[in-house]
Amino acid sequence: MGFIIIYITHPDMKTAKKIAAHLLAQRLIACANFFPIKSSYWWQGKIENAKEVVTLVKTSKKNWNKVKSEVKKIHPYDTPCIIRMEATANADYEKWIKDVISEK
């Protein structure tokens, strides 16, 4: 099957969990993992430093555009980070992802 991992940054855990819950409720993703991080980046002409939360969500390749669209609709950032990464895993895990997102 193959699947994708989508890397999304958020301003805080509350926002990360809200977006993940929204995607899970629609069965667009099978699961989400949350990681607190420290970020440095260019924004509006200067370097910013911030605490953020990264979410790694797992889904099928066919859900990429739907996930991206749903995140953009509710994300508080003007330019949210939504990065797609191709992935493979053990067969049982990939089957679990497929089964979970197919139960719409």
Image: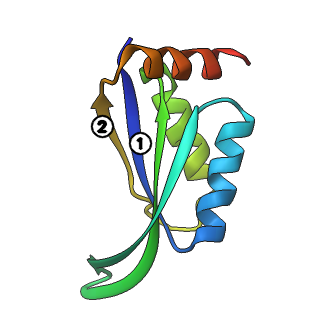
Asked which colour scheme the image uses, the reply is: rainbow
Find residue 15 and report its horizontal and vertical position in percent: 63, 66
Find residue 95 and report its horizontal and vertical position in percent: 50, 14
Residue drawn at x 65%, y 41% is 23
Q: Nearer the viewer, residue 96 or 24?
A: 96
In the image, is residue 66 above or below residue 23? Answer: above
- The kind of residue on which mark 1 rests is Ile
Residue that label 1 marks? 6
Residue drawn at x 43%, y 81% is 51
**Image-quadrant location for residue 85:** top left
**Image-quadrant location for residue 100:** top right
Q: Nearer the viewer, residue 93 or 70?
A: 93
**Left or right of 46: which side holds 18?**
right
Q: Nearer the viewer, residue 90 or 14?
A: 90
Query: Neighbour class for label 1 at 10 Å: few (<14), some, many (≥20)?
Result: many
Disc 2, SS? strand
Where residue 85 is drawn, which disc sits there? 2
How much space separates mark 2 and mark 1, taking CA atoms?
A: 6 Å
